[in-house]
Structure formats: structure tokens, C-alpha cells
Amino acid sequence: MLQLRDRLSAARGTKAINFKHVLLSVMIKSDSQADLARRTGLAQSTVSNIVRELQTADVLVSEPGRGARVCLAPTRNVAVGVHLGFNQATVVARRVDRPVTETHWEHVGSGANRGLGEIMPSLKQAVREAVAKTGRELEDVVSLGVAVPRMVDPRTGRFRTPVLPPWSEGDAPSDDLGEWLRVQGALDNDANLGALAEQTYGTDGHCEIVVYVKGSTGIGAGLVISSNPIRGHGMAGEIGHLVLDPDGMVCRCGGRGCLETIIGADALVRQAREALAGSVADVPYSLASLIERAQSGDAVCERVVRDAGRVLGRALALVCNLLNPDLIVLGGQLAAAQNLVLEPCRESLARYGLRGAVGPHSEFALKLSSMNPLSEAQGALVLGLTSLRRTDVEKD
């Protein structure tokens, strides 16, 4: 069975780098040669020659017929992605010769709020179990990506200063897990990676601008343009810190009236509990319980969720007027409310967005994530594979 580790070491020279780029692209997603050329930015003739040589070396195989997918030959190797959220974590593992539908995953019922040292043993156990489900061993892991709900500097792969709670200076979860797995880990913001996963696996790949909105403890957004995540210096996509109410509550970022203070999990639960104070009925204790009650017909909880959708739609109208995206995908815990949040969100988009950007004759679409709650972890898996290119050297 194919062992890819040697082929994924640092490449020197343009030809070796192009071979590795095509190989990594197939590991991320088997595709036609035309789509591999689009995803890699290489000429179709270059991709065709590389595929032919890798087929001769029994590394790649092609399905019969014109436009057929290029796939990996059976391999031992596994890619891992971790989403380390505030209150929970998810680990995904996939043999890189398998499609995304054959991804295995494990859930951890606690997250970064416990502290990195406390959560690390549980994360490692979840990685062990997810990799075991692929039929392989930890030594077969070749890549690791980690998604976190905080701002990450893309130049360093570290948390941006100031490092906000629950993280502390010096925390480096991708380094800690990577050292344990004996691979080089990569770190990025979870909304960025949710967008990357949606653009890679959740569309036909031809949406130029994709925005992924994660609504959970906080509100974040990731942006992908032409298959490239837009990170800025680590602050891009911080939709949760758009100021919608200048006289509103103080946010953990130091601002006032941020979107997150209005429709973040704590804010929504607080609204419902205040409205139900003194009631004999049980009050929601989490966003999940709030959504469950709303879907069961609780008038207060339903109103809170619908209002959250309206406020989110107003914020997304600003995004649409600025960026004119092809697609916005809603993920995170808030997306579990489905039409209770999606319908009022669409109403606000229609009201506040430019008709040419969001109207019935535009190319725009708003939908729920088809991969929720695995989007961020799947994006982390893609990040781990793409990061294997960062040690390549253009010239011999």
C-alpha cells in the first residue's frame, strides 16, 4: 500500500513543487484534470503531464472517460483536522485516498474554556479514536490542522496580540498536537477554515466569493475568494465585532455594541432568561437548549432566535454590499435553528442589501451549511494538507 510521507517532504525546484502541489490537491479532493488545474493555478498541460507521470509511478489513478476524476492509489496515510472551540471540540480524520464522505470524527464535550493543558489529553484521545476508525495508526498521520475561535496571524501561525481569553500568551495547540503526532501542525481561525471547507467540499467549486458565518459562543466569518482564504493580518472577517449599537453592551474585545454582544450565545440565552424570569417553566441554559425550546414552540425562545436572524441579516447586508459574494453559508450552533434563523435573515438581507447584490436576479445564495457541525474541522484538515507546501523552495 502506498506510503506518501517521502513525497510530502520539502520540495526543491519548480518541477518538484508542481508535482507536490498536484498531489496535495488530489489528497484534499479527487477531481478532474481541468478542475485540478483551476485549483492549483497550473496550466492544464502541466497538470496532464504530472498526472501521467504519477500514474506511471502508481501514485495516481484515473477513472475512465473524458473529464474523469483523478484519484490516489490506495494509501496508508491519514490527514487530521481539529476544531477546538470554546465549549467543545471536534476531531476529523480521513485516509487521503478516500472521499470526504468517508471522514471519521469524534466529539469532545469540553473545549478551550477548560484551559489548553486540561483539554489536551481529551483531544489526543479523540485523535486516537478518529484515526483508528480509518483503519490506520497514529504513525500514518501526515498532516494536522487546528481551527480556533480567535484571531490568528497568517504570517506566524500564532494568536494575534492581544491574546484574548480563553487563550493565554504562549498557547500553541497546533504545535503541541503536532509534536505529539510528529507532524508540523498549522493553526487558523475557525470561521476562515469553515469557509475553506465550504468552498472546497460544499459547492461545485465555481463560486468565486464564499462567506462562511459561524454563530456559536461568538460570531465569526470566513472569506474565500477564488479558493484563497482572505485573512489580512489575522483580523479579516471579524463580523462579530461590527458595531451595530454604539450605545450597546461592552464587548470582550473592548468595543461597545458589537454584533456578538447582540446575537452571541451568551446574549441570546440572557435575553430569554430575563424574559422568562419568575416563570414556572424551565429557562434555557445554553444556546442549544434555547434553540430546542424555540423549535418546540416556546414563544419567547422563538422570538429571540428570529430576532437574532433579523440582526444577523442586517450585518450580512453590509457584507454583501461591500463584497458582493456568490454564496453565504450559515454554520455553527445557531444554524441548528434552521428556518427559524434563516427566514428572518433573508428578510433583513432583502431590506438592507443592494438589490443587485442580493435580489432575485442576482447570483447570490444564502444557505445552511451541509457539513455542520464538521465544517471547521474539515477546513482544518484541508489547512493541514496545504500547509505542507510552506517549506518548498522555488530554486535548486
Image (cartoon, helix red, strand yellow):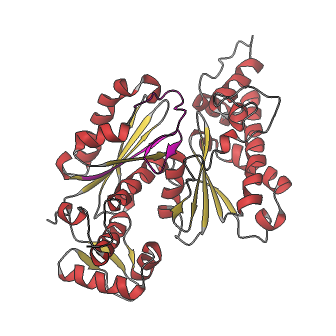
The answer to whether residue 163 is magenta is yes
Question: Can you give x and y, in whole percent of width and height, for residue 89 in the image?
Answer: 42, 36
Residue drawn at the location 32% of the way across and 40% of the way down: 175
Quadrant in which the N terminus appears: bottom left
> What percent of the width, then of the height, locates residue 346?
76, 53
- Residue at the left extreme, as displayed: 1
Q: Is residue 43 above or below residue 162?
A: below
For residue 365, above or below residue 173: below
User: Does the magenta portion include 164?
Assistant: yes
Left or right: 257, with 150 as reference point: right
> Which residue occupies 81% across, 34% down?
245
- Location of residue 280 with respect to 188 vertically, above or below: above
- The residue furthest right is 351
Residue 193 at least partly seen? yes
* Residue at image location 16% in from the left, 66% down from the top: 2
Residue 256 coordinates in the image, percent (x, y)? 75, 30
Which image quadrant for residue 3?
Answer: bottom left
From which residue to which does the magenta span run? 142-170
Percent across and percent down for residue 14 are 32, 76
